[in-house]
């Protein structure tokens, strides 16, 4: 039986497709792993997949361009790099399912088929998507994007900073301390660094869940209690 890995570009699809993705994939073999790459602050309905089917969530914050707003290809690049690592490190996986609605993954599909002699499938929602021709097979998912509900920004007490700003700033602070050789970052230090961009307390209470459920740019963090709570890098 084929061993399947599912790679989802969650930024251009609805998380309401999760059950259909699983059902269709099981027709092709055994699901080995399932990963979703997205900005979950804007696509929150993908997060239920963590609890329902063990989906690994890779949080990809938006990277602002100098012009024209966020870069739309951030998740695409993360997914492609991750897929290439799996091709080299996990030879037991013989089938790759890419869930996406754009043509950016055609080079990846060709690499999977021609260079590694494995199968690639495209799961998509847009009728007439010619990208499907580059794969061994394709499955059209029910287009339910009209059911997607986006998260509204959570503002701080000053009403001028979003949860997205807070999260990106948190990652910047952690990256700075760990690159300088810190063994951990205490919550008191993090709080001082984030002074002025601190959102509602509810977000701080969910730090443990955030670090447990999300792989942030392929780096895992953990919140440890006892004495003074601190964040460590796995």
Image (cartoon, helix red, strand yellow):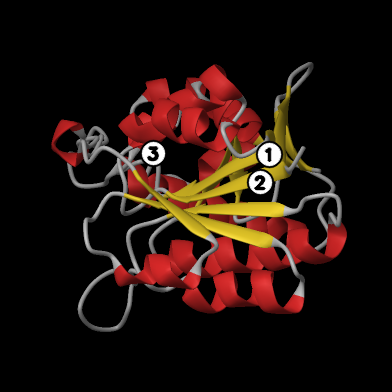
Which mark is in front, 3 or 2?
A: 2
Contact (CB < 8 A) between labels 2 and 1? yes
Q: Is 181 displayed left or right of 133 in the figure?
A: right
Residue hosting label 2: 5
Q: CA distance from mark 2 to mark 1?
A: 5 Å
Q: Quadrant of residue 4?
A: top right
- Residue in view at x 77 percent, y 63 percent: 87
| Residue 72 placement (x, y as % from top left) | 33, 69
Mark 2 packing: few (<14 Cα in 10 Å), some, or many (20+)? many
Q: Is residue 73 visible?
A: no
Residue hosting label 1: 33
Residue hosting label 3: 198
- Secondary structure under tag 1 reads strand
Q: Quadrant of residue 51?
A: top right
Q: CA distance from mark 1 to mark 3?
A: 35 Å
| Residue 167 placement (x, y as % from top left) | 45, 46
Mark 3 packing: few (<14 Cα in 10 Å), some, or many (20+)? many
Q: Is residue 183 visible?
A: yes
Contact (CB < 8 A) between labels 3 and 2? no
The numbered mark, 1 or 3, whose residue comes first in the sequence reads 1
- Residue in view at x 53 percent, y 43 percent: 192
| Residue 136 placement (x, y as % from top left) | 55, 62
Mark 1 packing: few (<14 Cα in 10 Å), some, or many (20+)? some
């Amino acid at each position: 039986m084929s061993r399947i890995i599912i790679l989802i570009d969650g930024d251009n699809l609805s998380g309401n497709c999760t059950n259909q993705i699983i059902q269709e994939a099981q027709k092709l073999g055994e699901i080995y792993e399932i990963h979703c790459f997205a900005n979950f602050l804007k696509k929150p309905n993908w997060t239920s997949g963590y609890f329902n089917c063990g989906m690994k969530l890779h949080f990809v914050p938006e990277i602002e361009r100098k012009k024209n707003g966020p870069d739309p290809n951030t998740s695409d690049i993360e997914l492609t790099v991750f897929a290439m690592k799996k091709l080299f490190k996990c030879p037991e996986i013989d089938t790759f399912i890419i869930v996406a609605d754009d043509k950016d993954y055609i080079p990846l599909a060709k690499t999977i088929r021609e260079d590694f002699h494995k199968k690639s499938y495209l799961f998509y929602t847009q009728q007439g998507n010619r990208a499907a021709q580059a794969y061994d097979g394709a499955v059209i998912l029910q287009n339910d994007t009209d059911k997607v509900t986006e998260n509204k920004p959570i503002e701080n007490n000053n009403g001028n900073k979003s949860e997205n700003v807070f999260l990106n700033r948190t990652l910047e602070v952690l990256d700075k301390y760990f690159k300088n050789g810190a063994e951990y970052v205490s919550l008191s230090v993090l709080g001082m660094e984030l002074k002025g961009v601190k959102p509602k307390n509810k977000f701080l209470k969910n730090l443990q869940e955030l670090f447990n459920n999300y792989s942030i740019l392929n780096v895992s963090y953990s919140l440890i209690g006892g004495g003074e709570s601190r964040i460590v890098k796995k």
